[in-house]
Amino acid sequence: MQKLSWSLAALVALSCAHPAAALAAPTPAAPPAARPDEAKPGEARPGEAKPDELKPEEKTSRGSVTAGGRRIDYTAIAGTLVVHPRGAEDNPPEPPPPGDKGERPVPPAAAMSYVAYFQAGADSARPVMFLYNGGPGSATLWLHMGAFGPRRVVTSEESHTPAAPYRLIDNAYSLLDVSDLVFIDAPGTGFGKMVGKDKEKAFWGIDPDADAFADFITQFLSKYGRWNSPKYLFGESYGTTRSAVLARVLLTQKYVDLNGVILLAQILCFDADVDGPEGNPGVDLPYQLALPTYAATAWYHKKLPDPPASLETLIADVEKFAMTDYAAALAAGNALEPGQRKLVLEKLHRYTGLPVAYLDKANLRVHGGAFEKNLQDDANLTTGRLDTRFSGPTMDPLSKDADYDPQSASIGAAYVSAYNDYARKTLGVPADRSYKVFAQVFRHWSWKHGDGFGLPTTTNVMPDLAAAMKYNPNLVVQLEAGYFDLATPFYEGVFELQHLPLPPKQQANIEMKFYPSGHMIYANEASLRALHDNVASLVRRTAVARPK
């Protein structure tokens, strides 16, 4: 998962509209004089954290965009909201003893940065969607500047995007035609800031991260008067992991029901990560779930010995093989009969394009990095990971695995440069603020999840999503998956959603959409158009009052 986050980082991603008008505040009375050993009102005692060390901020601008075939005037707000760890309000720091002027640790807090877009003249019945990228530790410029913001950066769809100047254009596929949008940067990323003792422990982990986002969302609903709006979560990559936990936390702890959860490039069960099993013998499911993506990639690069005309036909055949004959062969382990092994090897060669001898040495099991390195090895090319349609020169021809991700290298600079320029020139973010694309969370990240009882297990948040869907039987979940995504293979998302512990009736609340694109589905314009239409349809169908 660190490799996934590194790749994302390398790619690596507002008063007419909204918000309730501010009430005029009365002029405060002069504060009483304080004794020398006391703090004045609003100030801290010596050695304590200043209460205004982190403050909510906002910069307002206005614009318009034609999306969904109509012009939308909007207000944009670029700002921060200050969040605190769960339970902080119940455990305030103890005041120092009388006369003690020693230093006191600063309680942890985080200013999370965001950009919100509100349609001009709309009321609180308009839907609001909260969007974020993953990592963990990634800012949200990718979804903002590539998918649904009112402006998007143009990048090459299968090759390296030339260096600056980059093209920033009006985004005809922005979701502003159906919803207000809030792009949220995770704690420690974007224009945000974390302070306090053990701040990393307070915010960097599966549960602390979800708690921070839940705090942010409930504050946002209050600040902008959106408690009665239809509400949606849209997460990408680790953002889908976050969404599963966050949906449960919002409903069970904050009493916030959601209308829909959109999962782009899904990963809920980390036992299914195709980059994880090599050092974990006996865990073979990831190889099965990655095989359809291997096949789609080999088909795209013309590496199959007997390619079918239709990608969809190929995928259907490979999915069946992966869950039947291939699954049985992997389950047999060293007891696999030689004749059956030979048949499986030949089938794997037919579906992946990799040499039989290589597949035999790999013991029928090729993890993601090895596939990326070896598929086009004869041309000294490395295949992309986030989008396997991309290729790039191999760094080390003798390496076992891919040394980098060609798609990340191809488009990352365009996103980072375009967002920094847009944030300062259009949104009004001060020029002296630095934007942190990726926080180095992995030395601190806690994968512990839930009550912590029992034996340690690999992260699996499928029960969280199922719990949210059971608490709210009307909740609709929509999977968005790219055929050429090897960071979170599309069939992994299918498998996870088909295995949620749900009653059969609620399976009808799960929708699955597939695209001839990669991890960042929106990096392909035709797929971005289809993605917009699928999500917009979900919003229109679910943002209406249901009959009693």
Image (cartoon, rainbow, N blue to C red):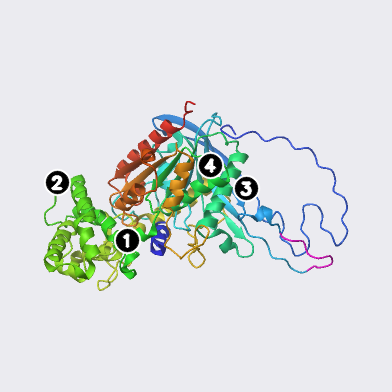
Q: Which mark is residue 274?
A: 1
Q: Looking at the image, is mark 3 or mark 2 earlier in the sequence?
A: 3
Q: Residue at x 38, y 33 (%)?
A: 537
User: Which residue in the rendered view is the most extreme toward the top?
Assistant: 547
Q: Position of residue 245 (x, y in %)?
A: 48, 51
Amino acid type for the residue under numbered disc 4? Ala
Does residue 46 appear to the left or right of 284 in the view shown? right
Q: Secondary structure at mark 3?
A: strand
- Per the model, the C-alpha gap separating discs 4 and 3 is 13 Å
Q: Nearer the viewer, residue 232 or 111?
A: 232
Tag 1 and tag 4, C-beta contact below 8 Å: no
Q: Secondary structure at mark 1?
A: loop
Q: Secondary structure at mark 2?
A: loop
**Where, by quadrant of the figure, is residue 22 drawn?**
top right
Please tell me whether the stretch drawn in magenta is mainly helix, strand or loop.
loop
Residue 177 part of the magenta segment: no
Magenta-drawn segment: 93-101
**Residue designated by label 4:** 116
